[in-house]
Image: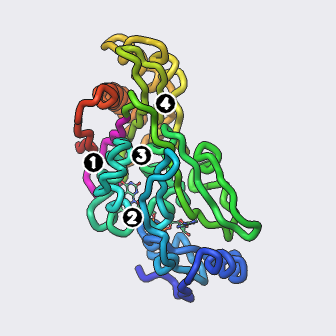
Amino acid sequence: MYPRSFHYHRAGSLKEAVTMLGQLGKNAKFLAGGQSLIPLLKFRFANPEHLVDLSFIPGTSFIKEDSGAMHFGLMTRHSEIEHSALARRIPVLHDCAAGIADVQVRNQGTIGGSLAEADPSGDWANALITLDTTVHCLGANGTRTIALSDFVTDAYTTALAHEELVTEVVVKIPPKGSGGAYLAFKRAAPVYPSASVAVQLKLAGDVCEDVAIALGCVGLTAIRATEAETALRGQILNDKTVATAAEAARAAADPQSDMRGSAEYKRQLIVALAKRAIQIAARRARGEKVEGAHLYA
Ligand SMILES: Cc1cc2nc3c(=O)[nH]c(=O)nc-3n(C[C@H](O)[C@H](O)[C@H](O)COP(=O)(O)OP(=O)(O)OC[C@H]3O[C@@H](n4cnc5c(N)ncnc54)[C@H](O)[C@@H]3O)c2cc1C
């Protein structure tokens, strides 16, 4: 289906984009990579009268390291992160970017658009919540920085005001001895996962000093599996402690049955993904080079 007709505007700067959206009012939307918004327009689930294109604003697509953190511009495409040697230093980022949909979607979709969309099945929010991530925003009242845990407030809902823009995503580089993994289980490349697990941990010898575990696609937002984290923190990582944590992750999941599988099937996926992700994260924390790709049915 064709979208309903709309007026197309091209912003020349971040400030201009915010001003334009404020002036055009509630029936205006930002357009980034269009990989979520354009399908919604075509299905006529969204019918904005105005689109303000962010794609031509200079200096909005970058990956850089500064003051112990990695910085991503709002228009940084999934594929840029996938192929970035810098981003690979935080393996969760590479795992996540490389597994999103297919090449076409990864070449267009942006990290800023993905977080702003807050799709419960989207990969970025789940992967990034295990890291110390902040979202930098620009609105009518100036700039503000929001912790990712406070940014996504519900399914398809964020802390952003209508005319407020995500300008940058900042991820603190984890300390030495850390490792992470992001694993998603999918039926095919160009579909969202049935379930996903992100793990970020820090080892001191065989002991898990600290850990963050998040579950995706099994709730309205990414779920921090705090009981699973407790099961590992301060413990030696072995088959028993990993299995206990994976069972705690299953209990934290709150999935719905849908075309991607029954609720029970997704809970079972969480157990398997959690075990694998913890093991890969631990091996990476020990300095091993381990590939951790999305898994397909
Ligand atoms: C076939 C297909 C399969 C996909 N599979 C996956 C998948 O497996 N995993 C996954 O994570 N994603 C998947 N996606 C979605 C894809 O990752 C999108 O790129 C992403 O969700 C949205 O980013 P975008 O840049 O395309 O944003 P757009 O679609 O342009 O915008 C999305 C929303 O965010 C708003 N917005 C955009 N940028 C900003 C900003 N900087 N500040 C404030 N608001 C903003 C827009 O107004 C709009 O409401 C898939 C998409 C398609 C078409």
Closer-to-camera residue (28/13)? 13
Q: Amino acid at mark 3?
A: Asp
CA distance separating discs 2 and 4: 25 Å
Mark 2 residue's CB less than 8 Å from ligand 1: yes
Q: Which mark is residue 77?
A: 2
- Given contact means CB atoms under 8 Å apart, are the residues at marks 2 and 1 in contact? no
Note whether 46 is above or below 176 in the view shown.
below
* Residue position marked by numbered label 1 in the rendering: 187
Magenta stretch: residue 42 in it? no
Residue 182: image x %, image y %?
36, 40
* Residue position marked by numbered label 3 in the rendering: 258
Which span is picked out in magenta? 180-191
- Of discs 2 and 3, which sits in the foreground? 2
Q: Is residue 285 visible?
A: yes
- Given contact means CB atoms under 8 Å apart, are the residues at marks 4 and 1 in contact? no
* Residue position marked by numbered label 4 in the rendering: 212
Note whether 28 is above or below 9 in the view shown.
above
